[in-house]
Image (cartoon, rainbow, N blue to C red):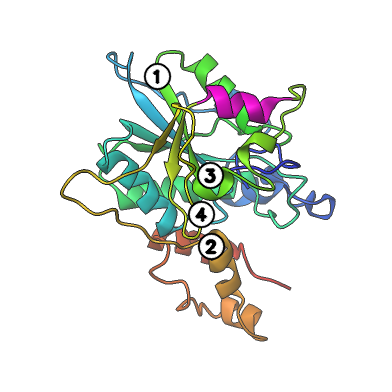
Amino acid sequence: MGTSASTPSSTQVESSGERQRSDSSLLEPSLGLHCSSHKQQQIHMHLPADDNKRVIAVLGGSFDPITDGHLKCACEIVHAGMAEEVWIVPCGRRPDKPSLKTPYLHRLIMCHLAINTSFGSSFPIRACDIEMGEDEALSTYHLMKRLQEQYPSPDFKFVLGADLIAGPGSLRTWGAPGVPDAGERLYQHSKFILLDRAGYAVPPDLPHNFTRLKAREGTNMVTEDVSSSEIRRRMNIGKDGVIALGRGNYQMVDGLLSPPVLAHIIRYKLYAEG
């Protein structure tokens, strides 16, 4: 849920060899989604009239695919009272990350499916398509800037793992086109909800714009550390992974992501290798 020094993305796109698998060519025939004017089709995130001090957590990522771990993280931010809403923001194309081959629209649709079938209709978690139609993923700096420009009233806080506070690829090293000190600006001025990560200590001298995610008094934080990469590995485990995929052998991931997301993956064979 962050970016590296060489990764100006809102999170951790297709390689040139995958360009023929464009969003529009893959999805238009089967889903009836016309993608030639993405920016005009973005969904405006309507906010209540009393949103002047509303805190919205921005959970960025490739969501390739979105897992139960992502969903639990999002809902626990709300349960802990850290934000009034969580916006799940799938990133755009990532030229620096050739492993991200799944088209943006598939990843966005899976986010909507997961949210709509995991939470009640009034629970404040939504998918935000602000990166739809971008040639490349927005840097975290530009993502937060654009959100604030489009929605000036709320107080946006970016969700960040404690593993991205220090060391190579940490927050302060992140870049952004045209902003040489983007990472330092983020560190000093943007607001963050900090997630604990096993094996990573939280520095005691963090600026006041960092808030550590903690459970409400009398409760324990519920977590599920299920990464998208683990899901993809399990999809094609063993030499007969592609054959198993075609036959619907998904026991290795069943229960780790919402059933509609799994059904979408099966229907479009998103992670079939070979």
- Magenta-drawn stretch contains 183: yes
Quick one: label 3 or label 1, which is nearer the N terminus? 3
Q: Nearer the viewer, mark 1 or mark 4?
A: 4
Query: Element at badge 1?
Result: loop
Q: Residue at x 31, y 36 (%)?
A: 124
Quick one: label 2 or label 1, which is nearer the N terminus? 1
Q: Residue at x 33, y 32 (%)?
A: 83
Neighbourhood count class around disc 1 (C-alpha, 10 Å): few under 14, some 14–19, many 20 upward: some
Q: Is residue 175 left or right of residue 147?
A: right
Range covered by the magenta-colored residues: 181-190
Whole-angstrom CA distance, mark 2 to mark 4, is: 33 Å
Query: Element at badge 2?
Result: helix
Which amino acid lies under the numbered mark 4 shown in the image of this protein?
Answer: Tyr
Neighbourhood count class around disc 4 (C-alpha, 10 Å): few under 14, some 14–19, many 20 upward: few
Which mark identifies residue 114?
A: none
**Residue denoted by label 2:** 265
From this view, report whether residue 27 is shown above or below residue 135.
below
Which mark identifies residue 200?
A: 4
Quick one: label 3 or label 2, which is nearer the N terminus? 3
Which amino acid lies under the numbered mark 1 shown in the image of this protein?
Answer: Pro
Which amino acid lies under the numbered mark 2 shown in the image of this protein?
Answer: Ile
The C terminus, quarter of image: bottom right
**Residue denoted by label 1:** 154
Which mark identifies residue 108?
A: 3
From this view, report whether residue 175 is shown above or below residue 274.
above
Which amino acid lies under the numbered mark 3 shown in the image of this protein?
Answer: Leu
Q: Residue at x 38, y 49 (%)?
A: 73
Q: Residue at x 65, y 47 (%)?
A: 167
